[in-house]
Image: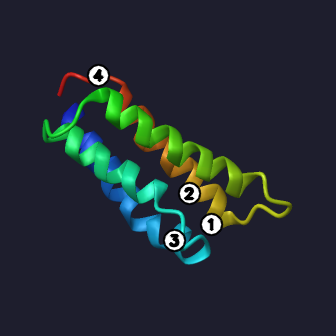
Amino acid sequence: MTTLEKKWFAIGCAEVVLSIYEAKYPDNKAPREAIEAAKDYLNDKCTIEFLKEKRSAAAYAAAAAADSKKVSYKDALLVFMKNFVEASVENNIEA
């Protein structure tokens, strides 16, 4: 797989688990917006600065979920997927 293919795969994985987060936190759109920003970045539709802004908001949302008194497997998976997408887009940014 090329680096670009890995980035798109990571985004696809995040989209698969996104519904889990949204079911628990329906009013928080930060993870969805971060995924959309990652796609836009790979399609040259936004800047890396915009992507980082959206990613930071998603990281805050994931941290809030993980900091709750009882971290579920699903929430831990969401944090993992967020970090996976973040790393795949951040590393080798030149696609």
Residue at image position (53%, 63%) is: 28
Location of mark 3 (residue): 22
Q: Which colour scheme is used?
A: rainbow
Q: Please tell me whether residue 39 is drawn above or below residue 52 in the rendered image.
A: below
Q: Which of marks 1 and 4 is nearer the N terminus?
A: 1
Q: Which amino acid does label 4 sit on?
A: Asn
Q: Is mark 1 on a helix, strand or loop?
A: helix
Q: Are marks 3 and 2 in contact (CB under 8 Å)?
A: no
Amino acid type at mark 1: Lys
- Amino acid type at mark 2: Leu
What is the spatial separation of the Cα atoms under label 1 and label 2, in whole angstroms? Answer: 6 Å
Residue neighbourhood size for the residue with mark 3, other residues' Cα within 10 Å, grouped as few (<14), some (14–19), many (≥20): some
**Could you say which is closer to the camera, residue 30 or residue 43?**
30
Can you see residue 79?
yes
**In the rendered image, which residue does mark 2 sit on?**
78
Mark 3–mark 4 Cα distance, whole angstroms, equals 29 Å
- Looking at marks 1 and 3 on the same chain, the residue that comes earlier in the sequence is marked by 3
* Among the 4 quarters of the image, the one containing residue 33: bottom left
Residue on which disc 1 sits: 74
SS at circle 4: loop
Q: Name the residue under label 4.
A: 92
> In this orientation, does residue 1 appear?
no
Do callouts 1 and 2 mark residues in contact (Cβ within 8 Å)? yes
